[in-house]
Image (cartoon, rainbow, N blue to C red):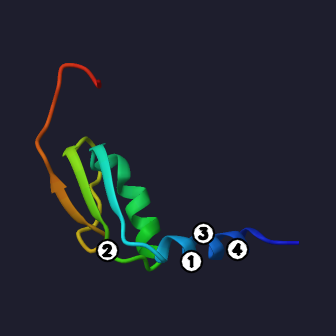
Amino acid sequence: MRTAADYKAIWHHKLADHKWIVCADVAAGLTPFMAVLQEAEAPRPLLLAGSEGTGELPDPDACELVILGTSGKTIM
């Protein structure tokens, strides 16, 4: 029977196999995922975000962060 650690190892292996470009409305919303990619020893991803958002931004070592400065009256 597989354990949670077994599945985590499989997931990390798959994440580490690829270079990532991640797009988001707000950078702060992807902080946890950037940490997961870093923990999986994936290549440092590019994170493109419309704005910073609120909350903690990703660690600069975890990703290359580009804030585009976009906004709108609605989420759409």
Q: Quadrant of residue 62?
A: bottom left
Q: Residue furthest front?
A: 18
Given the image, on which type of amino acid does mark 2 rest?
Answer: Arg
Left or right: 30 as drawn, with respect to 36: left
Q: Are marks 3 and 1 in contact (CB under 8 Å)?
A: yes
Q: Name the element at disc 3.
A: helix
Q: Are marks 2 and 4 in contact (CB under 8 Å)?
A: no
The residue beneath circle 2 is: 44
Q: Residues within 10 Å of mark 2 (few under 14, many from 20)?
A: some
Badge nearest the viewer, 4 or 1: 1
Q: Name the element at disc 4.
A: helix
Q: Do we see residue 4 in this rendering?
A: yes
Q: Are marks 1 and 2 in contact (CB under 8 Å)?
A: no
Given the image, on which type of amino acid does mark 4 rest?
Answer: Ala
Left or right: 35 as drawn, with respect to 75: right
Q: Are marks 3 and 4 in contact (CB under 8 Å)?
A: no
Given the image, on which type of amino acid does mark 3 rest?
Answer: Trp
Q: Position of residue 68 (x, y in %)?
A: 13, 47
Q: Residue at x 16, y 57 (%)?
A: 66
Q: CA distance from mark 3 to mark 1?
A: 5 Å
Q: CA distance from mark 2 to mark 3?
A: 17 Å
Q: Position of residue 60 (x, y in %)?
A: 23, 69
**Mark earlier in primary sequence (2, 3):** 3
Q: Name the element at disc 2.
A: loop
The residue beneath circle 4 is: 5
Q: Name the element at disc 1.
A: helix
Q: Position of residue 17 (x, y in %)?
A: 48, 77
Given the image, on which type of amino acid does mark 1 rest?
Answer: His
Q: Quadrant of the C terminus?
A: top left
Residue 13: numbered disc = 1
Badge nearest the viewer, 2 or 4: 2
**Mark earlier in primary sequence (4, 1):** 4
